[in-house]
Image (cartoon, rainbow, N blue to C red):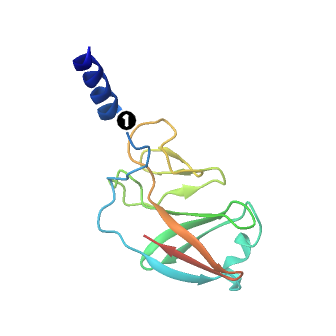
């Protein structure tokens, strides 16, 4: 009976998994930039629901203001990396123009459930007028 119990506990331990999203499609991409929200180019992200696409540290980055204090930022390179064009953003989803594959702007996941996630950056509001965007 003890052997069965030990076997059962061992199986449970090996079947547990971490739900952290690991994006294995983007390697070697780093970014560490601070933006000043007072600049006119960021007027669209002054209010919740606003978004803007900018060039940061040599990358094309989509910044979305979710709430008064929550931001999301995504790289606009197509996750499959076989397209020379940048993704577009229609206010709800990011779309790779080469394949028409769509990605959820809430978490970067592919809407069809297959493939890589869009590359998400960490966004930290460091003051009322400044954001730190990094990876």
Q: Of residues 1 and 75, which is closer to you in this image?
A: 1
Coordinates of residue 2 in the picture (x, y in percent): 25, 19
- Residue 54's place in the image compared with 88, above or below, is below
Q: Can residue 75 be seen in the rendering of this structure?
A: no
Q: Residue at x 54, y 50 (%)?
A: 107
Secondary structure under the numbered disc 1 in the rendered image: loop
Q: How many residues crowd around disc 1 within 10 Å: few (fewer than 14), some, or many (20 or more)?
A: few
Report the number of numbered marks: 1
Quadrant of the frame with the C terminus? bottom left
- Residue 89's place in the image compared with 110, above or below, is below
Residue that extends furthest to the top in the rendered view of this protein:
1
Q: Residue at x 48, y 70 (%)?
A: 60
- Residue 59's place in the image compared with 16, above or below, is below
To which quarter of the image does residue 5 belong? top left
Q: Residue at x 37, y 73 (%)?
A: 30
Q: Can residue 80 be seen in the rendering of this structure?
A: yes
Q: Which residue is mark 1?
A: 16
Q: Residue at x 56, y 69 (%)?
A: 123
Q: Of residues 3 and 68, which is closer to you in this image?
A: 3
Coordinates of residue 88 in the picture (x, y in percent): 55, 57
Coordinates of residue 66 in the picture (x, y in percent): 69, 60
Coordinates of residue 92 in the picture (x, y in percent): 65, 50
Quadrant of the frame with the N terminus? top left
């Amino acid at each position: 009976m003890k052997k069965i119990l030990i076997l059962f506990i061992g199986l449970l331990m090996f079947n547990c998994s971490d739900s952290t999203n690991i994006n294995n499609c983007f390697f070697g991409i780093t970014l560490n930039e601070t933006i000043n929200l007072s600049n006119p180019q960021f007027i669209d992200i002054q209010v919740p629901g606003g978004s803007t696409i900018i060039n940061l540290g040599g990358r094309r980055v989509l910044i979305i203001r979710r709430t008064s204090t929550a931001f999301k930022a995504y790289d606009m390179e197509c996750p499959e990396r076989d397209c020379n064009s940048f993704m577009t953003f229609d206010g709800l989803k990011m779309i790779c123009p080469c394949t028409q594959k769509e990605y959820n702007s809430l978490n970067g996941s592919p809407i069809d459930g297959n493939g890589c996630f869009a590359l998400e950056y960490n966004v930290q509001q460091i003051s009322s007028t400044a954001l730190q965007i990094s990876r």
